[in-house]
């Protein structure tokens, strides 16, 4: 239905704005940090300078095109030199550039000052999700895009925050100087939240830093900005800024969740529990490459259906999932997921899509294999 | 172009049949091959762009998979940069330089042949990877035309090795072409033509050739390091082995920034030839044009890291590269002001080459404005890797470089073929192209500022309107180029005979030769006063 309505919608668009779509935006927004407001201000200054220069340059050209055409001016002038004017149009641009450079330098120096921060969050880019680690708080988690596949393939109506929604939101307090530390585990990613004015590359083996002090509570959305492979377009960022008290409450909940997860890893799971949890966890962590149906992407990511590893030796299978395969896109999931998730995923892979081995892997098996 | 040559009856010996092209040492035949090669690649690269725009017509994945989308953007970029703009300029240099400096041919004709024939081999390798990808035998290069490590090294598909050897071949071809240009200009100018009497197009190519010799080996170095990282256990760009992925970007952009001027300096030269002709007035500020070109070439070596402001370089580095980049606005501004002053109080007519030249000045200046905005580091943090950048470089490369090539083809086609092209069709092509290019690229500024990253196969709903408009512009732009193809073929086959001067206000040695120009241009050097 959607697919049909789009071209029709376009026809409407040409006449009037189309209610099907979210509000569009023409310009940068000032954002909610001093950082983003600085960028917005300097953007506005330079843009208007360009507009003014544009009016002068395009105006002169248009005048010449209209007045100096052959029908109006059959005898061309022969001048080809004017030292005064040449000096003027070299010196004046230099002065304009200096006038731009001064405020730009001020804004930049303020931006790059990450000292005296109140808290730090370490952000790690993975293909294709973000990991957040609240430094010193023992709270860390992955954040995956939560837009369902059916919306992307046009089998379901797209939600309001299509492609800009995640399973685990990053929660931060307002009016606090938050230092972000960026790195990556595989390729280069870039963490960008336009409302903060923060865009920084997350580079494997290196740590970059930036900061934000958010002035208004709210939910802020962004995306990975550096091409990082097939699902580069599908690793959004969602940050929720809350009051200090609400933030602390959230932090305590996260810590409690962690204790509960540790307890569930101790028990023995049934096949149904493993398969149910495994399907969810597989679709979150594995399907981006190996695909929902386990068929992989030909020539890029191997399929798991009837794969020698998946239907073969359990120990080998557990090893590959925990430790990854060096030199390939297969990440080490041991540090990323807990024992219960890994056990469920491995069980699911061994029994889904016709891989009916009937074998179960318990969290305790994963724990001993680590 | 066979028809042309059969028509003019000079007394030159030239091989016939396929051998004429395979073994050609003639600057005109090689120039034609370069231009047809670029034209072919223009349609291939353009077809890839149209698949991209079709996919981006609406939110959701409709036509291709995200993985294949990345292959499309990669090959579109590589083909347009290395397969279209650069070979087209070399083709124009081949045709024009000997005629403009009063020489019989290029200085190194055999090398000329080799540098052309490496290109089909290079692009054969590159396109083979795309064909294999479509046939389900692995992935074509999928890491963007900038091929940042480690996405292109540890994580690159098997076809990356095809890509590496393809880039090596292109590099060798470009360096040989550049050596030939320099040797020709230095040694084969007509008596009396000192450096400051050379036509501006010759000057801009002279400087461009030095840029090519300086930076193509850097690119070769980058891809060689990739090759050894991939296969011979080195870790130039692998942090796990003590290497540095950011070093890749420094090396790449040390090549890459001069490269973008390699794609625009000859365009400046073309516009500086065309505007005086149709203004019937000498070029304003010849010597300042030469110095501005040289300054831009020099600055191009000290601005590369403005492509990398978000990589986390020290603030002193950010400031240096911001200031040095701002300086480029000065000589570039001088050029624009000079062109307008050339038009000022001239006696203007608006044949198709002039229309494209005027559109170039308007729209390249637009790309210049966004370029100035992009160099402001705090604002660049918001613009970087968004559609704002995509809009910027398409304004300078499509409505800049590509428009100048179209202007040059219209300007010199009568000289090459001996026939006038169809002016009505030319104007139709111009208006369709110019309007659709703006419908295509202008909305990209808006989605970029609104926060749409580049190189994504699917986007959030608030970007939908402008992407639809851009896609419509893309299809009109793409199909308009078929008019250009038809027009060129028509002109090659016949038409109103061109005079030797071709244009009323045309100056320069190439317009002293008959149209079509004889196979060996100037066999006796003309005297330049």
Image: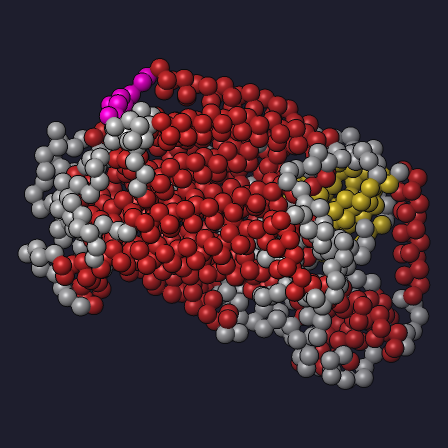
| Main secondary structure of the magenta stretch | loop
Magenta segment includes B290: no
Q: Is residue A242 above or below residue A336?
A: above
Q: Which residues are magenta?
A: A75-83
Q: Is residue A32 visible?
A: yes
- Quarter of the image for residue B30 reads bottom left
| Residue B287 in the image, given as x and y percentages of width and height | 28, 26
- Quarter of the image for residue B434 reads top left
Nearest the viewer among B192 and B442 is B442
- Quarter of the image for residue A230 reads bottom right
Q: Is residue A349 above or below residue B448?
A: below
Q: In the figure, is residue A73 to the left or right of A289?
A: left
Nearest the viewer among A77 and A309 is A77
Q: Is residue A354 above or below residue B309?
A: below
Residue drawn at 18 percent across, 68 percent down: B17
Residue drawn at 59 percent across, 22 percent down: A102
Magenta segment includes A77: yes
Quadrant, the N terminus of chain B:
bottom left
Q: In the figure, is residue B321 to the left or right of A78?
A: right
| Residue B385 in the image, given as x and y percentages of width and height | 59, 45
Residue drawn at 54 percent across, 29 percent down: A51
| Residue A358 in the image, given as x and y percentages of width and height | 81, 84
Residue drawn at 39 percent across, 55 percent down: B481
Q: Is residue B187 visible?
A: no
Q: Return the residue found at the far top.
A: A84
| Residue B39 in the image, given as x and y percentages of width and height | 35, 57
């Amino acid at each position: 239905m959607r697919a049909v309505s789009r071209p029709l919608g376009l026809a409407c668009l040409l006449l009037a704005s189309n209610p099907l779509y979210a509000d569009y935006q023409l310009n940068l927004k000032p954002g909610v940090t001093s950082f983003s407001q600085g960028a917005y201000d300097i953007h506005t200054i330079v843009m208007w300078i360009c507009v003014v220069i544009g009016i002068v340059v395009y105006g002169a050209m248009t005048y010449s095109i209209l007045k100096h055409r052959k029908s109006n001016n059959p005898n061309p002038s022969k001048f080809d030199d004017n030292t005064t004017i040449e000096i003027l149009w070299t010196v004046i641009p230099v002065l304009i550039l200096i006038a731009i450079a001064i405020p730009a330098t001020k804004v930049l120096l303020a931006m790059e000052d990450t000292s005296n921060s109140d808290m730090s969050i370490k952000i790690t880019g993975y293909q294709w999700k973000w990991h957040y680690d609240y430094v010193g708080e023992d709270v860390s988690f992955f954040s995956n895009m939560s837009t369902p596949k059916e919306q992307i393939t046009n089998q379901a109506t797209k939600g309001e925050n299509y492609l800009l929604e995640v399973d685990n939101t990053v929660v931060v307090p307002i009016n606090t100087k938050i230092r972000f530390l960026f790195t990556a585990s595989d390729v280069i990613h870039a963490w960008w939240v336009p409302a903060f004015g923060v865009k920084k590359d997350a580079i494997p083996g290196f740590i970059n830093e930036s900061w934000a002090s958010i002035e208004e509570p709210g939910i802020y959305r962004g995306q990975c900005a550096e091409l990082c492979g097939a699902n580069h377009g599908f690793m959004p960022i969602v940050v929720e800024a809350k009051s200090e008290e609400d933030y602390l409450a959230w932090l305590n909940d996260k810590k409690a969740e962690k204790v509960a997860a540790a307890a569930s890893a101790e028990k023995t799971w049934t096949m149904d529990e493993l398969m149910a949890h495994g399907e969810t966890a597989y679709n979150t962590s594995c399907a981006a490459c190996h695909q929902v149906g386990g068929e992989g992407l030909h020539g890029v990511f191997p399929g798991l259906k009837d794969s020698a590893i998946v239907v073969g030796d359990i120990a080998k299978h557990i090893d590959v999932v925990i430790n990854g395969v060096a030199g390939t896109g297969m990440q080490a999931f041991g540090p990323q997921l807990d024992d219960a998730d890994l056990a469920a995923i491995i069980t699911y892979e061994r029994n889904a899509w016709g891989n009916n081995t009937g074998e179960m892997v318990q969290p305790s098996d994963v724990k001993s294999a680590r | 172009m066979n028809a042309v040559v059969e028509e003019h009856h000079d007394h030159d010996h030239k091989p016939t049949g396929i051998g004429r092209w395979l073994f050609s040492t003639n600057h005109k035949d090689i120039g034609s091959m370069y231009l047809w090669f670029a034209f072919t690649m223009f349609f291939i690269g353009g077809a890839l762009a149209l698949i991209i725009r079709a996919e981006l017509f609406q939110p959701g994945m409709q036509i291709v998979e995200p993985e294949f989308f990345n292959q499309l953007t990669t090959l579109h970029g590589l083909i347009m940069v290395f397969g279209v703009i650069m070979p087209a300029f070399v083709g124009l240099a081949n045709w024009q330089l000997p005629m403009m400096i009063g020489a019989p041919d290029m200085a190194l004709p055999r090398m000329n042949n080799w540098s052309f024939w490496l290109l089909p081999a290079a692009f054969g390798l590159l396109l083979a990877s795309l064909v294999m990808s479509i046939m389900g035998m692995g992935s074509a290069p999928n890491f963007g035309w900038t091929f940042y490590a480690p996405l292109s090294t540890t994580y690159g598909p098997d076809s990356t090795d095809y890509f590496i050897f393809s880039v090596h071949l292109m590099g060798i071809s470009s360096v040989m072409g550049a050596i030939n240009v320099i040797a020709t200009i230095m040694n084969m100018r007509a008596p009396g033509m000192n450096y400051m009497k050379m036509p501006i197009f010759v000057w801009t190519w002279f400087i461009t050739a030095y840029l090519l010799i300086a930076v193509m080996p850097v690119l070769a170095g980058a891809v060689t390091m990739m090759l050894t990282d991939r296969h011979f256990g080195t870790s130039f760009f692998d942090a796990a082995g003590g290497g540095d992925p950011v070093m890749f970007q420094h090396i790449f952009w040390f090549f890459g920034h001069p490269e973008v001027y390699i794609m625009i300096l000859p365009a400046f030269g073309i516009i500086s030839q065309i505007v005086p002709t149709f203004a019937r007035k000498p070029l304003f500020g010849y010597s300042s044009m030469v110095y501005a070109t040289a300054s831009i070439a020099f600055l191009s070596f000290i601005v590369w890291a403005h492509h990398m402001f978000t990589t986390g370089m020290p603030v002193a580095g950010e400031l240096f590269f911001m200031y040095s980049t701002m300086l480029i606005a000065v000589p570039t501004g001088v050029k624009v002001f000079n062109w307008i002053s050339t038009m000022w109080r001239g006696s203007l007519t608006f044949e198709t080459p002039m229309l494209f030249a005027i559109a170039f000045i308007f729209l390249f200046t637009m790309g210049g404005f966004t370029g100035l905005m992009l160099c402001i580091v705090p604002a660049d943090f918001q613009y970087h890797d968004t559609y704002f950048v995509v809009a910027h470089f398409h304004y300078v490369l499509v409505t800049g470089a590509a428009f100048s090539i179209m202007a040059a083809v219209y300007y010199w086609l009568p000289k090459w073929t001996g026939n006038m092209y169809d002016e009505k069709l030319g104007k139709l092509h111009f208006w369709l192209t110019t309007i659709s290019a703006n419908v295509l690229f202008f909305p990209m500024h808006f989605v970029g500022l609104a926060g749409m990253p580049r190189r994504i196969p699917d986007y959030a709903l608030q970007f939908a309107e402008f992407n639809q408009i851009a896609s419509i512009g893309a299809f009109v732009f793409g199909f308009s180029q078929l008019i250009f193809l038809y027009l060129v073929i028509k002109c090659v086959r016949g038409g109103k005979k061109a005079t030797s001067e071709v244009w009323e206000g045309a100056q320069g040695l190439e317009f002293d030769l008959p149209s079509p120009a004889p196979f060996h241009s100037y066999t006796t050097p003309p005297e330049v006063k």
